[in-house]
Amino acid sequence: MNGLMLVARREIVTQVRTKAFVIGLLITAALVAAISFAPKLFGGPESYALGTVDSQRLPLEAAAPDAEFTWRAFPDEAAAKQAVLAGDVDAVLVGGTKVLTDGKIDDQLGVLLQSVNREAKLGAAGVSIPPLQVVSVGADTRYQAARTGLATVLVIVLFMMLIGQATMVAMGVVEEKGSRIVEILLATLRPWQLLGGKIVGLGVVGLINLVTILAVGLAASMASGISADFPPGMPGLVAGVLVWFVLGYAFFATLAGAFASLVSRQEEVNSVLTPLIMVIMVSYFVSFFATRDPTGTLATVTSYVPPFSSMIMPVRMAAAEVPLWQAGLSMAAMVVAVLAALAFGAKVYQRAVLRTGARVKLGDVVRAR
């Protein structure tokens, strides 16, 4: 174990001291912050489509001159409900006493309607005015847009992190094998210590990048005000993302290191990593589909199947409410897959890493005794 930690420490120190790592981390943090502020800076004026049923239009323009309002009159409440559910209008004022919405009304619009309605009726009657009753005619969609946005960002981040870190492990293995440094290292270390130390060390580097992205993104979202739209349970979601990254990285990085030990030249790395890259790509595309339909059959089934679950389940958890038992079952299956990958990868690496020259066939390595 001491040998593994020494290798891990070497990988961490080597990576974090490079200018490329520092500059890349700063650029990533700046991009994440810019994306978090983009909706506020380039969103333009707020615009609302409103309707009325047996009610006068409220003078909202005077209270919010920077916003745009369009009004439609409906003959009855049934027609107004259909328009709300179809998304033709954001809200409908009915009889001057209640507001129809599809889910939770926009915060700014809700405040405007309540305050302007109260001021208008006070001016006319000079008496105490009850607040407008907000009635939802559809599902509660208050957090859906934020969930979809978070899930989409999460897909991209996990995809880039998993494929990038796994490739780094593979390139490191081939570099050591091609330069024959591995022969010197294995004189004092066991093969599993060398491979494990590389996986752990580069995994910590990946976690540094991921934690930076999450921390900067959350801080910038709070500063820009976007965090007000985030669903509850964000700390649990962030913790879950970190755990799923560790599991996914452990699986793909182990196999990437094992497959890379079959070749001696970096030009051959892409060919041996093709199966892993294809699996990651499939996970990526299904995860994107899951951002729009997180409860669909495809997203639900694949979120239980390792290694696809390492990307799809955290995306489902961000895009919709997922029962705890489902997440736990999926995570347990992924842990079993990681253990199997570690056992298989260690065996392949041990038998192939000292075979230099031509590419070693995986079948020959597996059958070797």
Image (cartoon, grey):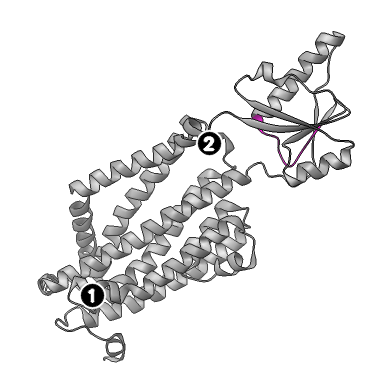
32 vs 132: above or below = below
Residue that label 1 marks: 268
Residue 356 on image: x %, y %: 14, 81
Residue 312 on image: x %, y %: 52, 62
Q: Residues within 10 Å of mark 1 (few under 14, many from 20)?
A: some
Q: Quadrant of the N terminus?
A: bottom left
Residue 85 on image: x %, y %: 76, 45
278 vs 232: above or below = below
Q: Nearer the viewer, residue 232 or 134?
A: 134
Q: Quadrant of residue 258?
A: bottom left
Residue 234 on image: x %, y %: 53, 44
Q: Quadrant of the C terminus?
A: bottom left
Query: Which region is colored magenta?
Result: 99-107
Q: Quadrant of residue 22?
A: top left
Answer with left or right where residue 47 lies relative to residue 3. right
Between marks 1 and 2 in the image, the one whose residue lies nearer the viewer: 1
Residue that label 2 marks: 227
Helix, strand or loop at label 1? It is: helix
Q: How many marks?
A: 2
At label 1, which amino acid type do we have?
A: Glu
Q: Nearer the viewer, residue 75 or 322?
A: 75
Helix, strand or loop at label 2? It is: helix
Residue drawn at point x = 67 percent, y = 33 percent: 106
At label 2, which amino acid type do we have?
A: Ser
